[in-house]
Image (tube, rainbow, N blue to C red):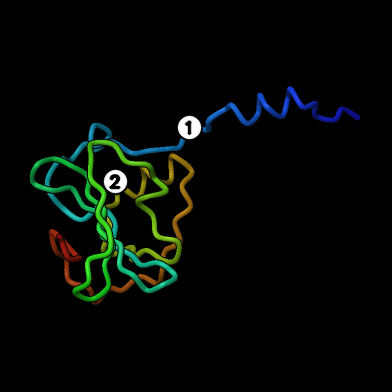
Amino acid sequence: MSHMTLEQLQEIRGISAVKPSISVEELENKAPRTLLFGYDVDRNTYHVYLDESGDIVRVIYRLDDHIDTVRGQKLDIELLVPNKRVYPEATDFAFAKLLAEKDAYVSYTTYNSERKPAQFHGRRF
């Protein structure tokens, strides 16, 4: 049996795990649109989209109350995927495929064939 030494513990603590991310550069289609639409355990809505300036934007809101926004050319996946469910019919296939290729855990809700196709499925702040 080989137990960790204090020096090894300090070495482990010094390693910063690389967080998986997605960049605009990885998206073949650069047209502004919803990339992911879902909600978290607190029933806050997550809308991830590509905006007109070419940034990936993630907004979190509830009804008309804006909670948080992050934007950039490259964002950590943990910021993009809600901890509850994602609406598959309102999520971009290429973006979902990128998430899957990066081993991101995405929990999809039941497919709603009644949802109308749209460029954007959620609020933009």
Q: Residue furthest right?
A: 1
Q: Secondary structure at mark 2?
A: helix
Q: Which residue bears the numbered disc 2?
A: 94
Query: Given the image, on which type of amino acid does mark 1 rest?
Result: Val
**Residue 20 screen position, x and y as percent:** 43, 37
Badge 1 density bin: few <14, some 14–19, many ≥20, Cα 10 Å: few
Residue in front for this viewpoint, 94 or 65:
65
Residue in front for this viewpoint, 53 or 106:
53
Q: Which residue bears the numbered disc 1?
A: 18
Question: Dividing the image into 4 quarters, which one contains the N terminus?
Answer: top right
Rendered residue at 22%/73% (across/down): 115
**Total count of labels:** 2
Q: Secondary structure at mark 1?
A: loop
Q: Please give left or right for residue 24 compared with residue 75 in the image.
A: left
Rendered residue at 37%/42% (across/down): 76
Would you place residue 63 above or below residue 124 in this image?
A: below
Badge 2 density bin: few <14, some 14–19, many ≥20, Cα 10 Å: some
Q: Residue furthest left?
A: 52
Give the quarter of the image for residue 28: top left
Nearer the N terminus, badge 1 or badge 2?
A: 1
Would you place residue 79 above or below residue 18 in this image?
A: below
